[in-house]
Amino acid sequence: MIQDERSNELRSRGGQMDWPLVLVTTLLCAMGLVTLYSAAGSPLVDGPPRAFVMQASYMVFGLVLMLVLALLDPRVYERGAYLSFGVVVVLLLLVLLVGPVRGGSQRWLALGPVNLQPSELAKLALVVATARYFASRPRAEGWGLRDLLVPAALFLAPLALLVFLEPDLGTTLFLCFVFAAVTFVVGLRWRTLMVALVVVMLGSPIAYRVVLNDYQRERVDVLFAPDADPKGQGYQAIQGRYAIGSGQVLGKGFGNSTQGRLRFLPEQHTDFIFSVFAEERGFVGCVLVLLLYFGHMLLGLWVAWNARDRFGSILASGVVAVFFCHVCINLGGVLGLMPITGVTLPLMSYGGSSAVTLLLATGLLLSVSTHRRTR
Amino acid sequence: MSDSLGSLSLRVEGRPQDLRSRLGVFAGLIVLVLVMLLCRLWVLQVVDGAVYAAQAEKNHLKQRQIPAPRGSVYDADGFRIAEVRASFDLVASPEDIDLEPVLAAMDRNHESTSSESAEWGVSIRTDIGTLASRLEPLLSDVTEQELIDRFVDGARSDRWHDVVLARDLTADQLDRVLAQRAWLPGIAAVSRHRRSYPEGGLFSHLVGYLREVRADELEGLKERYRDREQGEDWYRSGDLIGKYGIESAHEEWLRGVDGAYWVQVDVHGRELGRSTAGASQAEEYYQSIAHFLDQAVVPEQPGHDLHLTIRRDIQELAVELLGEQSGAVVVMEVQTGRVLALVSAPGFDPEIFSRRITPEAWKVLSQDPRHPLVDKALQGVYPPGSTWKMIVAAAALGTDTWTKETTVRCKGSHKVGRRRFHCWNRKGHGRVDLKKALAGSCDVYFYKAGLALGIDTVARYASMFGMGDRTGIAINSESEGLNPDTGWKRRRFRSRPQSAAWKLGDTASAVIGQGYTLATPMQLTIMTAAIANGGTVYRPLLLDRVVGQNGDVVHRADPEVVGHVDLAQEHFQSIREGMLSVVDDLGGTARKQRVRHLAYAGKTGTAQVVSLKTTRRRYRGKKVPRHLLDHAWFVGYAPYEDPELAVTVLVEHGEHGSQASAPIVRKIFEHYFANRIQQAKEGHFRVGDSRPLPPLRRKKKPIVRAPPTPEKPAPAVGSPAPTVTSVGGVEQVGSAMRPTPPGEPSAGIRQAPIESADARASVTTGPLGSPSSVAPTASVISDEEVGL
C-alpha cells in the first residue's frame, strides 16, 4: 500500500506491510517455480522434477525468512551490518579452505543435504555494510575516486578478492557493479563517474587481452559472432535464441518447451530459464515477467525514496541494485546483448542460495518500507 | 533537491532526501533498460520468431524414411526371380555425430548441483572416431578407419540423412551392437529391404543386379528426376540402383518411392515418439507435437512387380544342359517374340553386387576364362557359321537368282580367284539342290550362290532379318553384330585403301558366316523365328506386364513387329524344308537329334575361333586345346508345321553344332512339347508333321536299353533331379508356393524325382532323366539302327 509522502506523516514506526512488494515477489517466485517445473522436467520422466521440489522448499523457507526480516526494525540491520559482513567473509574463507572443488572452482559449502553458496550472501553483506558506512557519512560535495578508496578497501576488496579466488569472475564483477551502484546513489560525483566510464571503455579491450583467460574471451567472442562455432562455443547462445524466438507472440504453452525439455538448450533450468519461459509463454508472457521485475525494482526505489533514514534508503537502493544487476546481466546474456555469464535470473533460476539471498534482500526492503519515516 | 542548506540539516538527522536525485536517475536507468530488453524481445520473438521456431523445430523433429520395397520379378508362371527381404544396416546420423572430437562435452563444464544429470549420463555428442573405435570390435569385419571414411564420405554429401556404416549385419553383429546402444549415440540399426534372388545364378544376366549409387551418379539422378513426379530426392546416398539386366532396364518400374514419418528426438538423438498415421493421431503424444506437422506420415509407395515372359523351367533346363560349358541359349516364341529363356553361361550370383564385392570374388569373376560377366546371348558376337546359310538361301531365292531346284556339284572345294575354298566335307557332297545343301550344310553350294548374288545383296537380306542391328530387347546394351558389305569394308579400312576393296574371297567367307560376319545368339533367334513365321521380325519381349501394388496391371507389353523380310512364302517354305532336312533326313547334319514324334527344323553352325589352317598346322595329330576349338551353333524351331518356338544354342568351343548344341535344342523342344509328344506317341502321329508317321521297323533287339547312349552322359542333367528327390520336404514347400502353370511342360523335369532306383531300371533314363523324354530318345536310337 503506497501512500503519498504527505499522508504518511502521521504513521508511527512499525507501520503496515508493503503488500504490493510482497505480491510482486510472490508472483515472481510462483512463475519461477512453474517454469522450473517444465524446464527441469523431461518427457521421459514422470512426476515433478527434483529441482522443482528442492526449489519450492527453498522458496517457502526464503519467503518465511523474508516476512520475518520485514518485521524487524532496519536499525537491527544497521547495528548488525559489520557483524554479518564479517560472518560472510569467514564463510568465504571457509569455502576456500574446505569447500569441495567442482568443475575447477570452489564455490560451495556442503551443509548436509544442501549446498550453501556464500558468494550469493556476499552481495547482500556488501549492500548492508556499505549502507551502514555511507549512512553516517553524508557528503554534500559528493564522493570522488579518492574518497572511495577507504570503503572500497574495507568492504569491496575482501569480498571481491575471496570470490575472485574461488574463482568466480562473474560474481566478482557483480560485486563491483553493486558497489558502484551504491556509491552512485550516495553521491558519486558525475565527473568521477564519467572518468570511470571512459576508463572502463578504453580499458576493456586491454582487459580482454590481458585479464581474461581463453574461456572467458570465447564468451565475449560468441556475443559478437555466435554463428562462428554453432556446435561449440556458440551453441548455448544460438540454442537460447532458438528457444526465445520460437516462443513467438503467445508461446508454445506450459510443458511444450522443446528446446528446454528435450535438452537442446543447456543450463535450461538455471541461467537460461528465461529462454524456456519465453519459449512457453511467448512475447506476452515475457512482457509480463519483465514488468514484474521492473515493478519490483521501482517499488524498491520507492521504498528508498520514502525511507526513514539514510541507512534505510541506501540499503533499499542497494537491494534494488542487486536485483537490477541480476536481471540486466542475466537477460543481457540470454537475449544476446552481453556475454553469457553465470548470473542467475532472480527468483526464477534454479538455485537455493540465490533464491534465499534474494528473498532475504526483499525482506530487507520490506523492513525499510514497513519502518518508513513518519512525518 | 539537494541544496547545501538542506543537506546540512539532513546530515544531522540522517535523512535520505539528499539521495533522491540519484534515486530518480536510477529509476530512469531502470526504465531505459526495461525498454531496451522489451525491444530486443520484440525483435527475437515477434519479428524473427518464425525463423527461430523453424530452427527449434529442426532440432527435435526429424524426418525418417520409410523405405519402399522394390518390386519383385516373376517368371511367366509366377515363380519369384527377384524379391525383397529384410536385413539390418548400421547407420549413423551426421547431425548427431561430430567429425572431430569436440572439447569436453557441454555439460561437463557445468557443475550441476542436481543429481538429475545422471539421467542424462551420456555426453551430448560423440565424434566419429570414438564411435568407430567402439564399433570395430562389435562388427569385427571392418576396420576403424573404414568406418570413419564411410561416415565422412556420407556426411559430406548429405548431412541431413543417415550414413550407412555397415550393410546386412549378421545376427551376431546385430545382437552386439544393440546391446551397446547406450554407448553409441547417433548410431542405429535400421531394417531395410534387401534384394534377394531365390534362384541364385540361374537368371544372372537376365535379371541383372543392383549396386550402390555412386556419388557422381547421384547428381545426374537428382537432375533427371527434379522435374518429374518422383522428385529430386528419389535417390539418396547409399541407395541401390539397378545396374544390369532387368534391374537396370526397368529401374523406374521396380523402384518404389520412400515414405516418411517424423520422430521427436531429444538432444542425444533419443527417440521420444513418432508420428503415426490413422487412429493413433488421437494419442496424447501425437497431439503434443501435432502442431509441428503438416502431415503425420507420408506412406511409401512400393515398386511395381514385373512379370516376365521367361519360364523358369526352360531357363533351368537350359542352364543344366549347358552344364560347365560356356555359351548361350535363347528360347523365343516364334509368333510373338516373347523370350522364354535367355541364358548366358556361366552366370554369377547377382546378390554379391548389392553388397560390397570382395576383391577375391571379383578376381574370380573377372579372370575366369569363360567370362561370366559377359552376357553371351546379347553382348557376345560370334561368327554365325553355317546358320548364315539360310540368309544366303533367302537372298538367292528372293532375287530369283536361283530356284530351289538349282543344283550345284560339290567336289569338296571351290576355287575363288587363286584361292581354294573348301567344303567342310572334303569328300564333297556331290550334286545338291537347296534342300540337300542346307541339310548337309554344303559350303560349295553357298560359295557359288553368294558369288552369284554379290555380297551387297546377301547383306541386304541379312539386314531384313535384323542382322547388324540391335534387336531392341532393351537390356544389357546388346551388341549389333556385324553384317558386312562393300560399303562397310570401305569405311572400315578407309585408312588403308589397298585393303578397302571387297574381294570375292570375302564374299565366300561371309556367305558361310565366317570372315567379318558376326552375330549374337539373340539375332540368330530372331532370324530363325522370322524364317519359321514367314518373315515377321519381332522385337524380343522379356517383360509381359507390370503390376501395381493393388494388383492392377499398369502396363502390358504387346508383341511388336519391327521388321519384315520381303520374301515369298514359297521361298520360306523351301528354306524350312531344308532346315527340316537337317534334322530329319539322312545326310542331315543333325540327323542324330531327330525326334520321332516331333518334327522340328534346325541348322547347325560352326564358328571358327582360329583359322582351320592354323589349327591344323600347329596341332597336327595332337589334341587341340579347348579354348581354340570352334564354337558350336544350333538354331532350330518347332514344330515344323505351325511353328511356336525358336531356339538358339551356342556352346563356346563346343566344336560341332551337331554334337554340342543340337542335343540341347532337341531336349528343350522335348521338354516344351512333352505333353504333345506323349499324345502323339499314343495317337501314332507326329507333332508338327501332317504326313503320316512312317511305320517303325524294329530290329530284333529291343529298342529300349539301359543305360542310354546319348551324346552327353546324363549326370550334368540328371544330377539335380535326384537332389530334389532327396530333399522332398523342401521341394514340397517350394512347389506349394508356386502356382502350377497350365499345360505343365515343366512336369517332365519336376516329376523326374519320382522314379527312384527301382523305377529307373525299367524306364530308360533319357538325358533329361524324365519319362516324357524317354520315348523320343529311344526312337532316335531306333531310327538310326533301322536306317530310315
Image (cartoon, helix red, strand yellow):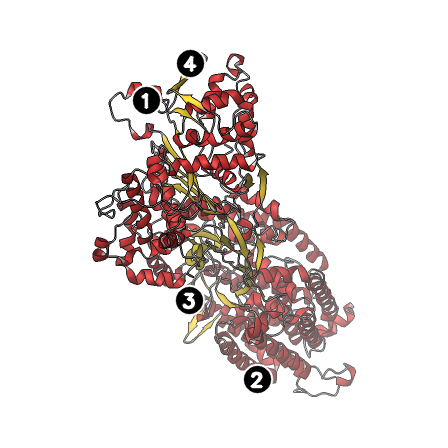
Measured Cα–Cα span from mark 3 to mark 1: 100 Å
Give the x, y percent position of residue B714: 27, 45
**Which residue is denoted by mark 2 in the rendering?**
A68
**Which residue is denoted by mark 4 in the rendering?**
B419
Q: Which mark is residue B615?
A: 1
Residue B568 picture quarter: top right
In this rendering, which labeled residue sits more in front, label 2 or label 4?
4
Residue count near mark 3 (Cα–Cα under 10 Å), binned few <14, some 14–19, many ≥20: many
Identify the mark nearer the N-term, 4 or 1: 4
- Left or right: where does residue B740 sit relative to residue A340? left
In this rendering, which labeled residue sits more in front, label 4 or label 1?
4
Q: Is residue A218 above or below residue B592?
A: below
Mark 1 residue type:
Thr
Measured Cα–Cα span from mark 2 to mark 1: 119 Å
Residue B640 visible at all:
yes
Mark 4 residue type:
Arg
In this rendering, which labeled residue sits more in front, label 3 or label 4?
4
Give the x, y percent position of residue A63: 57, 81
Measured Cα–Cα span from mark 4 to mark 1: 19 Å
**Which residue is denoted by mark 3 in the rendering?**
A99
Callouts 3 and 4 close, C-beta under 8 Å = no
Check the picture and name the quadrant holding the N terminus of chain A: bottom right
Residue count near mark 2 (Cα–Cα under 10 Å), binned few <14, some 14–19, many ≥20: some
Q: Chain of mark 2?
A: A
**Label 3 secondary element:** loop
